Each structure stands twice: as C-alpha cells, then as structure tokens.
Image (spheres, coloured by chain):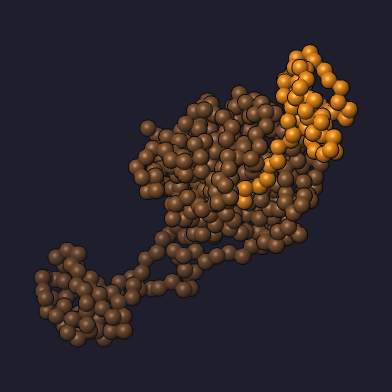
Chain colours: A brown, B orange
Amino acid sequence: MAVPLPTDVPTFLAPAHERLEYVPGSIVVGLHESAGEPFDYLQREAGAHTVESLDDNLTVVGLDERAVSQQLLRTVESSPAVAFAERMPARWLSAGPAADPRHNRQWGLRAIRWFDTATPDVVSVTVAICDTGVDETHPDLAGAIASYDHAGASADDLVGHGTHVSGIAAGRNDDAAGVIGVAGCRVAMWKVFPDEPMQGNFYVDGTRFLRALNAVAASGAKVLNLSLGGTQSSQAEQLLFERLERAGVTVVAAMGNEHDHGNPVEYPAAYDHVFAVGAVAETNRRSPFSNTGPHIGIGAPGSNVLSTLPVKASPYRPDTRYASWSGTSMATPHVAAAAALVAAQHPDWTPADTKEHLRSRAAKVADMGGKSFTEEFGSGLLDIASLLASD
Amino acid sequence: MKIQFKLREGASVDVPGAVRLFPDDDDPELASLYVVELPDDEAEDTLRELKRSTAVEFAEPQAERRLHR
C-alpha cells in the first residue's frame, strides 16, 4: 500500500514559482572599449560596491538591489563606451532536486563521502539483519526486503529498530520518498526479538537468535548486521560466528552504547570474526555514548541518524515513518551496507579481505591525533569514496 | 533460565526437557548443541553438573542480548 509521505523542501532549489529571475544586486555591463566612466557613474549615483572585470569587454557590478532599475540600466547604456547593461540572470541546476527529499538531513552520508562517488549496483547482494523485524510496506523499503523470517512472533516491527536499521542500509535511492540508503542492497530480515518486553526491555530470544545465525550462514547473504549485544560471551555463538566466516559472510556488530556506564566489552562485537563498529557524531568526534576498545574496527555515523520507521505507531514507539535515532545500532548498518558495496565490487573476496579493506580505506579523523588506530575510532571513519576507489 | 550445552562426539547426558538447538540439521557440530529451559533455582545446579560432566564440551547460560539504540 502506498502511503503519502510529507516531504521536506530541498535546500538547494526552491519550487519553480519561488525561483528568482535575476541575481539580486548584480548587473553585467558589456563595453565596446575600455572605459571607466560608466563605473564612476554607478559608484557615484547608485552606490556600486564592487566592479569586477571578467575580461576587457565584460564587467560585473555589485550594488544594492534597491538601486537597480530599468532607468539606471538605460542611463549606463547611454554611454558611447557601453554595448549593453543588463541584470545578471539567475541560473539553476537542471538536475532538479534529488529524488529522495530528505537527503539533506542525512549528514552521515556526507560524512562518509557517499555523495562523492558512484556506487555499484548491489541489488544482487543481500545483507542479513537480525533485529526487531521490519515494516515491508514502508515506501522507502519497497522491493528491498528479500525475505522476512518472523517465526514465533508477529510480522509487526513494534519497536521499529529493525526498520530503522534497514532504512540506513537499504533505503531506496532516488525514489521520491524519504531517505537514501547507503547501498541499494536487499535485506533478509530475521526477527529475533519478542513482541513483548521483559521488565521494560527488549531482549533477544536466544534460541531464535542462534537458529537465525545458522540460517544466515546457509542463506547466501554476504553480510550480517547485528545492531545488538550484551556483556556475556557465549561459546555457542562463537561456534556459529566461525561458521558464518567460513560461509563467506562478513559479520558487522555494534560496539555498544555504555561508554559512560563502565564502557564494558560487549559481544558479539568483541568476537574474533566480527567487525565492530563505533558511533561518530556530526562533529567527526566519537558519539559520547559509543563504547571504545581494542576490538573496534572503524567508526560510522551514529548520532541523530535519520531513517525509516514503521508507518503504524505501536505501544513501544510513538514515532512513525521517519525519525532520527542515535546509537552504535545506527552506525553499524552504514558499515554493513558498505561491506555489501565491497562484495558487489569484489565478489570473490573473503570476509577477512572485506574487513581489511574497510580498515585500510577508513578516513583518519582529527581526534585520532595522527595515529593509524585508536580505541575510539579503530582505523578511522568509514569512507565510501575511498572504499570504492580503484587503486 | 535457558542453558545451552554442547556434547562431545558420541557422548550423551540425561537432562530432562533438553532439546536440540538445531533439530533439522544433520551437521555433527550443530547436532551436538542442546538447549533446556529450567526454573532459576534448578538451573544453577544443572549448569554446575553439566560443566563437570566429561560428556559435555561446554555449558553456559544463554547470553542476554539487547538493542544498541
């Protein structure tokens, strides 16, 4: 079902009826010959503040918009030295606004230099996500959900977390709706959270989670996104992550949001075969909540990340359609989608190759102090342009 | 509390209520993984016994995992 969505006004181009015909306070003077007299007049009578010669015959004059009139232009043209005087015409981009109307609010895409490169076609690459489910009817996820296993629970994403994560990774690009996903990949969703919270919190159904990990290994997915975690390690989980690695699945997991609550080591992020992702804020500094540690791979945008939410509200989530959320949960799908882009570009690479590439192409940020690795940022900030650049 | 454990190859233990984690999978490694849900007051004793058993490669409580939003 198509749902009408409110749209934001793109900041770089006003609607046609609001566009300017002329650049305010700017006139162009064409000369037959080099002459100073017309400009002396403009400075004296019209308060011209800038006179910029483009070449011997063409000069742009800046002045107060209120001083610009047809009478003024005719007076300047009356000089024998002047071929013409006219207002500077306004020109705008022919491309029109970006189709996804909220893209200007996606600061993270600029931070990871997503706009600076062409991304490969990744529709053949599937990113698996174990999360709270997904709203398959969301217009920005139309056609993006390859499969959805919610056995043992409803199909509804009551929390909205899985839908938000899915939009970051795979929101449809250039579809005149909402947001841009980092990759145009497809998503295979396993809902591993129950419909009801336990003591006010949502916890993974452990058995369902382990079964989902095994199913992902057999699914053909190239990447697994895990925006979840906890402080206890598990040998059963480790066994399954080793199998995922052998199956060619790059596993990406969130570092955790408890930096100011003891900064614990969290799993699955800290397992050997898992690529751990920390959160970075708009300032290119570590998001204050983002855990640190020697196991971190890289950082990615995790503060105020705009993405999709289910179109229907739930008792656990008043927001619908779109919202900006924060967490290493939001940083992780940026990197999972980046891994999908790498998989599309290098289909024969192993997860180890992909993870090394993500590390080696990350951008160093100022807070790393010139080091190649820090426990706050790992090897740096995800850099899509560098990641996809040929050597 | 849920406990998961892995049996050594060819071994068995008697834990009432335990089921295979991957009942449809013939892979020996996966076929040796079990899970059992027990009341908290029984679970700790059972976990201790499983950890002591030579038939068991590992036994652990199911790890808590939550969202990182």
Query: How many marks are shown on the rendered structure?
Result: 0
Whole-percent x, y for residue A293 in the image: 51, 40
Whole-percent x, y for residue A91 in the image: 37, 66
Whole-percent x, y for residue A260 in the image: 55, 51
Q: Quadrant of the N terminus of chain B?
A: top right
Q: Is residue A50 above or below residue A156?
A: below
**From this viewpoint, which residue is outermost toward the right?**
B16
Q: Is residue A238 visible?
A: yes
Residue drawn at x 51%, y 53% is: A288
The reply, left or right, for residue A76 in relation to residue B61 is left
Q: Is residue A83 above or below residue A201?
A: below
| Nearest the eye: B10 or A338 | B10
Residue drawn at x 75%, y 14% is: B9
Q: Is residue B29 above or below residue A296?
A: above
Residue drawn at x 66%, y 50% is: A161
Q: Is residue A362 above or below residue A310?
A: above
The reply, left or right, for residue A321 in relation to residue A277 is right
Examine the image and state in which quarter residue A317 appears: bottom right
Residue drawn at x 57%, y 29% is: A273
The reply, left or right, for residue A342 in relation to residue B45 is left
The reply, left or right, for residue A176 in relation to residue A385 is right
Whole-percent x, y for residue A104 in the image: 49, 59
Q: Is residue A335 visible?
A: no
| Nearest the eye: A283 or A41 | A283
